Amino acid sequence: MLAQIAHEESSQCCKAERSLLRSIEGGCQISMGVNTTLDDDTIKLTATLLSRDGQISITESTRGSRFDAELLGENLAREFLKNPHARPLLGPAGQKRALTYGYMEAPGDAAAAAAAKDQEENGSPKKACIRDD
């Protein structure tokens, strides 16, 4: 059933974007915009990293086969990580960055446990952003 509504080209563009964000741990703690275009079988992946005040803007871009979408995202992430102007905006190398704010940023089962406790105490379910560390 999913095959009837899935659009392979769009899925590959999304894979490139998600691979970039995952590779630099680009959750809601950094300001980054990502644009992906597809021309025949070529993906152009462009991302802009901004400082919180918007005074610094760094744009990197790459292109390649849509069949290498995840690799394109990883390669573009490496370009940002090598860029000395981007490094201060991304934080120290190897530092784990929270994916979201508050208790939901806890790694692994801790986020799910915190969400369950919150639901028990407040009666309102909240979704946790879980990461495997």
Image (cartoon, rainbow, N blue to C red):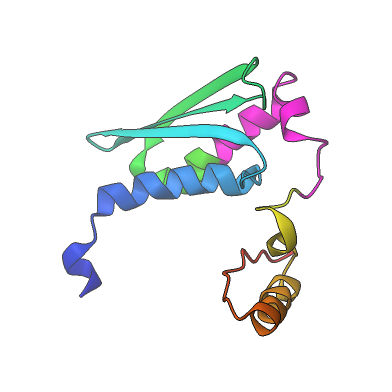
As drawn, 42 above or below 28: above
Which residue is painted at 72% across and 34% down in the image?
90
* Side of 40 relative to 133 (left or right): left
Foreground residue among 79 and 48 = 48
* Side of 23 relative to 110 (left or right): left
Which residue is painted at 81% across and 45% down in the image?
95
As drawn, 9 above or below 82: below
As drawn, 103 above or below 117: above
Magenta stretch, residue numbers: 74-96
User: Based on the displayed image, in which of its 4 quarters is residue 125 positioned?
Assistant: bottom right
* Side of 17 relative to 24 (left or right): left
Q: Residue furthest bottom?
A: 120
Quarter of the image with the C terminus in it: bottom right
Quarter of the image with the N terminus in it: bottom left
User: Based on the displayed image, in which of its 4 quarters is residue 130 positioned?
Assistant: bottom right
Foreground residue among 72 and 3 = 3
Which residue is painted at 75% across and 64% down in the image?
106
* Side of 133 relative to 127 (left or right): right
Q: Residue furthest left?
A: 4
| Image location of residue 117, percent across then percent down | 72, 80
| Image location of residue 81, percent across then percent down | 70, 31
